[in-house]
Amino acid sequence: MTTILRSPAAKHGPGVSTSAAVFIVVLGIAGAVLLPVATIPIVLLGVLATYRYAPQALAVATMLTVAALFAWTNAGKGIMGDWGWYVQHYQVLEYTPFSEYIGARIGAVTAEANEPVYYLVADALAKATGANVAVLAIVITLITYITIGTAVFIAVLSVTDKRVAVIAAVTVGMMMGLTFTLSTQLVRQEMAAAFIGLSLVLVAKRRLAIAIPVGLIAVLTHNSALIPAAGVAAAWLIGRGVKHVLIRWVLIGGIFYGLGRLYLTRIGFEYTGQNDGSISTAVIALDVVIFVAFATLLRQQQHRDPIAHFVLMAVPSFYGFVLGVASQPLPLLRMYFYVEVLRALMLAFIVVFLMKARWSALLGILAIAVGFIYVELRIAQSPFHFDLTMIQIITQSPFLGP
């Protein structure tokens, strides 16, 4: 006779007692009632974690949750700075045929025909919603963050299927990558940067049939995206012909540094003395630390991930051009947006690499907390007004108040 040994769990049923299960359910219901914005996504992610295709489902759900929080926050942003002229143009589009609008100078800005992507979106929304500004803010925020979020979660899923790691890496990459407070300020360039990030990841996965049109959309959103698009192409082409990593770095970096210097002498002189802002030393130092951490951890990985290595090969082209235009504040500011794309992807990979160690769940929670704190600090330090910060939105309660 064969004796089958049963564990206590097998003998008495699930390891969670009935009283504990009731407690968890009651706690979940109480949380959903008192703090619905915070509790509902957490419960949703918890349910998805048990799903057969959990990593993919969790990645998409996390991306949509973060994008929705950003959109909600931007819906209450005050109209000031560059957002002012975007709103002015948006209101004009409500009653103006697009053919008459494009190419016309309104206020201090001309809607250029070679950058039509954003203007087409704004035209459709203006005529459909009566130029509702909150709708514009929500839609362009969702476009930007769903696009960069897709790039991030594709990169994350290429190196891990651990559920907590997926949630943490996607959250951190989206929150600490593109500067949120500028998503409704330098609108077209943030959108273009997001498209460049997605194109870069697709090139790394050899999905050129999709990557090339996405890169073209980036350029048609803001023409400055032509430089990072060329950088992605150079990393791909030179990487196929030159195998030594250091030689590739020197070659690509030298080419794009030279292009940056050429840009200043041929075109950039128009921006001499102009300064719409600056890149703080702290941000540059942070990006250097992120790069060093990423490169160090990447060398320690046993599996060679094509996306992570392609991000590394894109660094000299992106940074090379930035260094080439660094003497002029405005071109530096505009081109540094594309460096933030690399930051988003590098941070996502860093989180995944670190969570391969012990205490991965604790590290994941800490990483998510750092992402939220970073966004809150960005909002607090920005000159723009928001009706509610992200933390205030999450902690809203019909009973406890905002």
Image (cartoon, rainbow, N blue to C red):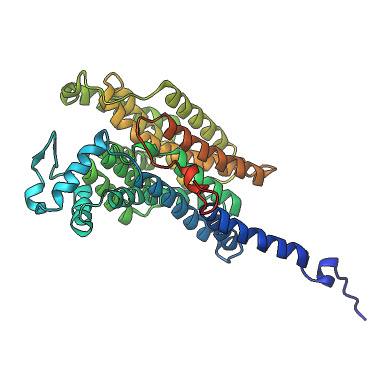
Q: Quadrant of residue 97?
A: bottom left
Position of residue 279 in the picture relative to residue 82 (left or right): right
Residue that sits furthest to the bottom in the current view? 1
Q: Is residue 275 shown to the viewer in this render?
A: yes
Where does the image place residue 136, in percent across and percent down from the top left?
A: 28, 50
When the figure is inspected, residue 299 is found, relative to residue 212, above or below; the finding is above
Where does the image place residue 27, in percent across and percent down from the top left?
A: 66, 58
Position of residue 385 in the picture relative to residue 52 (left or right): left
Position of residue 384 in the picture relative to residue 389 (left or right): left
Position of residue 48 in the picture relative to residue 237 (left or right): right
- In the picture, the quarter occupied by the N terminus is bottom right
Residue that sits furthest to the right in the current view? 1
Residue that sits furthest to the left in the current view? 100
Q: Residue at x 42, y 52 (%)?
A: 68
Q: Quadrant of residue 317?
A: top left
Callout count: 0
Q: Is residue 16 shown to the viewer in this render?
A: no
Where does the image place residue 131, in percent across and percent down from the top left?
A: 21, 52
Most foreground residue, 71 or 149 = 71
Most foreground residue, 310 or 345 = 345
Q: Residue at x 42, y 21 (%)?
A: 281
When the figure is inspected, residue 353 is found, relative to residue 13, above or below; the finding is above
Where does the image place residue 6, in percent across and percent down from the top left?
A: 86, 70
